[in-house]
Amino acid sequence: MAYIFQQSLNALQLGSIYALIALGYTMVYGILTMINFAHGDLFMVGAFFCFLIAVYLHLSFVPTLLLSMLGVAFLGVVIERFAYKPLRNAPRVSAIITALGVGLFLENFTLALSPYPKHIPQLLGNTTWTLGSLSLSSLQILIIALSLVLMLILDFIVQRTKAGMAMRAISWDKTIVPLMGVSVDKIISLTFAIGTGLGGAAGVMYGLAYPIIDPYMGIMVGWKAFICAVVGGIGNIRGAMIGGFILGAVEIMVAAFLPSTYRDVVAFTLLLILLIVRPYGILGKPQPQKV
Amino acid sequence: MSNSSDTSYSALIERWHMLTGTRLFRAVVMIAGIAFCIAVDTFDFVDLYLQLILIYVGINIILTVSLNLINGYMGEFSVGHAGFMAVGAYIASILTVHVFPPNAQNLLFPLAILAGGMAAALVGFLVAIPSFKTRGDYLAIVTLAFGMIVKSILENIDAVGGPRGLLGMEKLTTLPWVFFWTALSVWVIRNLVYSNFGRGVLSIREDEIASDLMSVNTRQVKIIAFVVSSFFAGIAGGLFAHALQFINPRMFDILKSTDILIMVYLGGIASIGGSILGAVIYTILLEILRPLGIWRMVLMPLMLVLLMIYRPRGIMGMKEIRMFVPLRDFVTEKLWRQKKKEAGDASA
């Protein structure tokens, strides 16, 4: 019983990281109907920013997190402006291939600058409390709590503020919204900033939880987060959160009860079955098709 | 002045089109290609490194043309092509290493490659089934997950070496064989695309529901497209395994699929000539830039992004080299353009 509870905590930790990354995919998709395949690599860049700031500036945890988020958000906006904006009216796949190219560029650029895996120093004292056979680490609780807070803030921004209303409006109808006096370019930039900033935060947390980072770490995590976004129903923010926690739970539980090398097989097979049962994700609505 | 040079230029193009569109020209290209490959293989006047690059070019052409059938002509977004390749590579290698007698390797090699292709085609059939209900990004996820599942399963089977990989293949992939399989894949897919069935594939890309209403059997078309595409991916995998003489599951991960995607979109969707061009340019450019070391991997994606911004459809998107267009289609398109131009003149 305690084992299951322990594993649920691990699942929550992994799931909250997946959910934070999946949010970036889903927000960009909701507004541009474009899959930003460079997002997983922005997550990796976030972890590297965390490493740079912690090692060279010796800042403590909170400024490190904020600076990394800001840095990644800035990078995301720059990428949007120079790589994706010229393609807004191009065929959809061109934008997707561009995103793949940007992702490869980020990976290999980081690899060229830092050929060896890096070790993130401990930013926080990690205390472990034991309750019976159960052990709670403060780091784990911090990651879960922090991601929940970030998700609540995001939900507030999207549901309650004017900018959030504009975001939802753009994903509803792209042609009418600019006529209502909304600056679409600014909202898209803001969406990219928030989405990639969350990815950067996920990178920092991932770096704290699993301190060895390398330039290719964003590929697998990024694709998995994309799967989370689709499982939740892509374009749907709450769906992305649910999808993240589902994948985290499945992966940890499979690793807990089966040989851990079967983790990917079982996780992906379950996801395939889920997609066959609900082809548009858990919270996604099927789009009516017209001729 | 410029007008006359314009007409002479277009007349030249016209004559080039007439020349390259003939059966004779195609036969000459084929014979020249196979003669060159056999000559290289027997007399060894090209150094081994260049030969290996030529082999990779051929394998990449097979992969690109076959993926273009799904991503370009059918308009789906498949991200798991390396998975089919892995199936073909492993099946073919298991046959040549463990099953076939060692003294008959050369003779039985085409059989091994064929078996790899068949196995990949069978798997492609399974992947086609979810495509009945889902499309677009959701189908992309299905193919993506499929690719990851194949890789993880291979890592978990100890009999084929698990994560360490499989070795012991002889170097059976020779230039003539690569040329044969490349020509076969181009020939089959070109003929499929311009057949009645190919019209069905194109109609699914343009509008699936409309094509269903026009009595296109969309399920059948999707199954055949996936099966043919994965069959050739499996063939390419078998050739790849016997060219490198070593395979492991990590060679067939997402990065490999991304490579193939890049070649398809670099060359241009829905164009066989474009696929060939994309595969040739990408493979050779990567080799030319090798002295740059890791920075070539920084430069390549940058060039891809710039290409996509300035030419979003790739080098030959939706256009075709005259050599691959049947005369009937060529004439029809020409007449259609003429008519459109006349209509435009009349309205102006």
Image: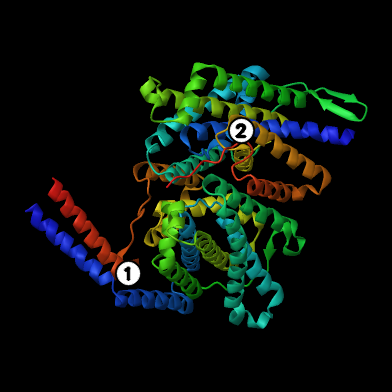
Q: Secondary structure at mark 2?
A: helix
Q: Indicate the quadrant containing the N terminus of chain A: top left, top right, bottom left or bottom right.
A: top right
Spot the residue most to the left. Answer: B1
Residue A6 x %, y %: 84, 33
Q: Is residue A119 among what the camera can see?
A: no
Type of amino acid under label 2:
Ile
Mark sitting on residue B326: 1
Q: Is residue A125 among what the camera can see?
A: yes
Return the residue nearer the eye: A278 or B68: A278
Tell me the residue at 45%/28% (across/down): A170
Q: Residues within 10 Å of mark 1 (few under 14, many from 20)?
A: some
Tell me the residue at 40%/75% (across/down): B36
Mark sitting on residue B88: none
Q: Is residue B277 above or below residue A254?
A: below
Residue A71 x %, y %: 54, 25
Tell me the residue at 36%/23% (across/down): A179
Q: Chain of mark 1?
A: B
Residue A77 x %, y %: 47, 28
* Residue beneath disc 2: A21
Q: Chain of mark 2?
A: A
Report the mark closest to the observer, 2 or 1: 1
